Image (cartoon, rainbow, N blue to C red):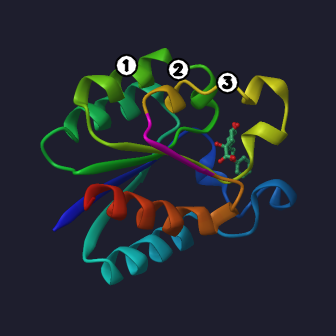
Amino acid sequence: MTKILILNGPNLNLLGTRQPEVYGTTTLKDIEVMCRSRADKLGATVEMRQSNHEGELIDWIHAARDRFDGLVINAGAYTHTSIALMDAISSVAIPTLELHLSNIHEREDFRRVSYIGKVAFDLVMGHGADGYPMAIERMVSHLSS
Ligand code: CA2
């Protein structure tokens, strides 16, 4: 069975509770339920985690090496700053999909740079919470092709 790890970076624990005009009203827990349901339909399993700490995200990526077939990551603001996360993804060589709630190409200039994008095979952005099950779908189809 295909096993997918979904990682969420800093501040995404606040989803659904602050700035609903930017990030919507769906909580991360709701998103986890949506992902699990989509994965079930596709014969896959998902594990979802969130951390506000770069090092913890890196440790989880390292540990994913022999445990997961694919990584879906919304690295939050680390997307635009973290060469360390990019290197961690390269080092484990797990197929990785970059995910964002918002369209990072239509926001501030500093959000246009993505280190995650340099090591990801695909990008889903601008679909809010619906982007998560969409990303699961794309990951499963990538892994089966
Ligand atoms: O659009 C996305 O998914 C982002 O990864 C979200 C990050 C942002 O820094 C990236 O440029 C794009 C910010 C996550 C903050 O999440 C919050 C959620 C609710 C309330 C406040 C922040």
Q: Residue furthest top?
A: 83
Quarter of the picture holding the C terminus: bottom left
Question: Which residue position is annotated with label 3?
Answer: 113
Q: Main secondary structure of the magenta part?
A: strand
Q: Residues within 10 Å of mark 3 (few under 14, many from 20)?
A: some
Which comes before the other along the chain, label 1 or label 3?
1
Residue 100 screen position, x and y as percent: 62, 48
Q: Residue at x 53, y 40 (%)?
A: 9
Residue of label 2: 82
Instruction: Quote the CA–CA distance across marks 2 and 1.
Output: 9 Å
Residue type marked 3 = Val
Q: CB of mark 1 within 8 Å of CB of mark 3? A: no
- Residue 8 x/y as whole percent: 50, 46
Nearer-the-camera pick, 10 or 132: 132
Residue holding disc 1: 87
SS at circle 3 = loop
Q: CA distance from mark 3 to mark 2?
A: 11 Å
Q: Secondary structure at mark 2?
A: loop
- Up the image or down, 100 lies above or below 138; here it is above
Q: Is mark 1 within 8 Å of ligand 1?
A: no
Whether residue 86 sits left or right of residue 42 in the image: it is right
Rounded to the nearest angstrom, the CA distance separating label 1 from label 3 is 16 Å
Find numbered disc 1 in the image and state the secondary structure of the residue it sits on: helix
Magenta span: 120-124
Q: Earlier in the sequence, mark 2 or mark 1?
A: 2
Where ligand 1 lies, by quadrant?
Answer: top right
Q: Residues within 10 Å of mark 1 (few under 14, many from 20)?
A: some
How many other residues sit within 10 Å of disc 2, few (<14), some (14-19) or many (≥20)?
some
In this rendered view, identify the residue nearer to me: 82 or 30. Answer: 82
